[in-house]
Image (cartoon, rainbow, N blue to C red):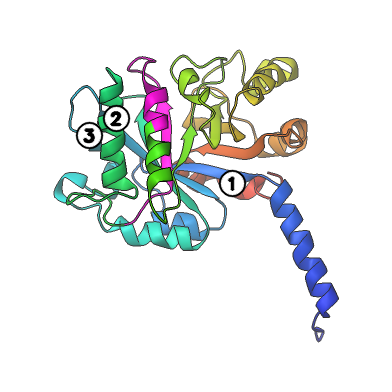
Amino acid sequence: MASRALTPFQLIAALLVAFLVRCHGGGIAVYWGQNDGEASLSDTCASGNYEYVILAFVYKFGKGQTPQLDLASHCDPSSGGCTGLSDDIRSCQSSNVKVLLSIGGGDGSYGLTSQGDARDVAAYLWNNYLGGSSSSRPLGDAVLDGIDFDIELGGAKYWDSLARDLKNMGKNQLGGKGVLLSAAPQCPFPDEWDNGAINTGLFDFVWVQFYNNPPCQVSAGRGAFMDAWKQWESMPAGKIFLGLPASKDAAGTGFVPADDLNNNVLPLIRDSPKYGGVMLWSKYYDDRTGYSSDIKSHV
């Protein structure tokens, strides 16, 4: 059957509908870098399933330590082997995928001992991953979009100072794009480590881990889950994301089958004023289940 070209009016109407869908719909964020055998960074972004990709992790920093990046077998930063990811990062960004670097994680050696320590860490991240300059940028010359705080140990102090310093560095960069900030707190409210930082009001995204936390995850029941969601919505942050494992194997508890998420969970939160979408841990597990593809049209 022959197709007919759209009239200018029809084309404008179609573009408007697409724009409205994108404005009111959510996006998917995914963590990448901690498992062997997951898709490359460029292929991850080229899939079209994600709006945010979070590189994990800088697992060692602060307390006078030399910061260290770990991206599993994807590359070896100590030998300069990760600088080739610059092309992948730029490819992601050209596809309107924001690429952030996560600091912390559940297993590492990190923490901040003072405001000065926070300032030093901020300067390191700025010069080595963001808009600054350094002779030893682990990911090459690509400029990442922001920093993700996945703080799960190391004390609760001075993360607010780190957030302020990073945001200020972004603001002071002439012609720069600023620094996006995200956080990945556990769903029990308030978070033991990230609360002070998120309360600064500087965070663009908060992807709350509604897994490995039975009292507030979806399986706790509608009431407990929604109470937790509303508490997180009360935080002075940009968008709140529902953090979930992409498969049963990705976490001890908290997996929600795609059909259940689409039909029973997302309708509860999708109209929330701060709803941003779904965060998945992680790309490796998503590759094996196709979870993001199953939920994308509902997010």
Query: In this image, 207 relative to 157: left or right?
Result: right
Judge the density around disc 2: few (<14), some (14-19), many (≥20) Cα neighbours within 10 Å. Answer: many
In the rendered image, residue 208, in percent from the top left (x then y), is placed at 55, 27
Marks 3 and 2, how far apart at CA: 14 Å
Q: Tell me which numbered mark, 1 or 2, is placed earlier along the sequence.
A: 2
* Residue type marked 3: Pro
Tell me what residue is drawn at x 42 percent, y 24 percent. 160
Marks 3 and 1, how far apart at CA: 32 Å
Of the 4 image quadrants, the one containing the N terminus is: bottom right
Q: Secondary structure at mark 1?
A: helix
Pointer 2: what residue?
119
Query: In this image, 137 relative to 94: left or right?
Result: left
* Residue type marked 2: Arg
Tell me what residue is drawn at x 56 percent, y 32 percent. 243
* Residue type marked 1: Ser
Tell me what residue is drawn at x 36 percent, y 18 percent. 153
Query: In this image, 171 relative to 65: left or right?
Result: right
Judge the density around disc 1: few (<14), some (14-19), many (≥20) Cα neighbours within 10 Å. Answer: many
Pointer 1: what residue?
292
Which region is colored magenta?
142-164
Pointer 3: what residue?
67
Q: Is residue 136 above or below residue 277?
A: below
Of the 4 image quadrants, the one containing the C terminus is: top right
Q: Is residue 32 above or below residue 62?
A: below
In the rendered image, residue 136, in percent from the top left (x then y), is placed at 18, 49
Q: Tell me which numbered mark, 3 or 1, is placed earlier along the sequence.
A: 3
In the rendered image, residue 81, in percent from the top left (x then y), is placed at 20, 53
In the rendered image, residue 26, in percent from the top left (x then y), is placed at 66, 44
Marks 1 and 2, how far apart at CA: 37 Å
Foreground disc of the pair 3, 1: 3
Foreground disc of the pair 3, 2: 2
Front residue of this view, candidates 23 and 252: 23
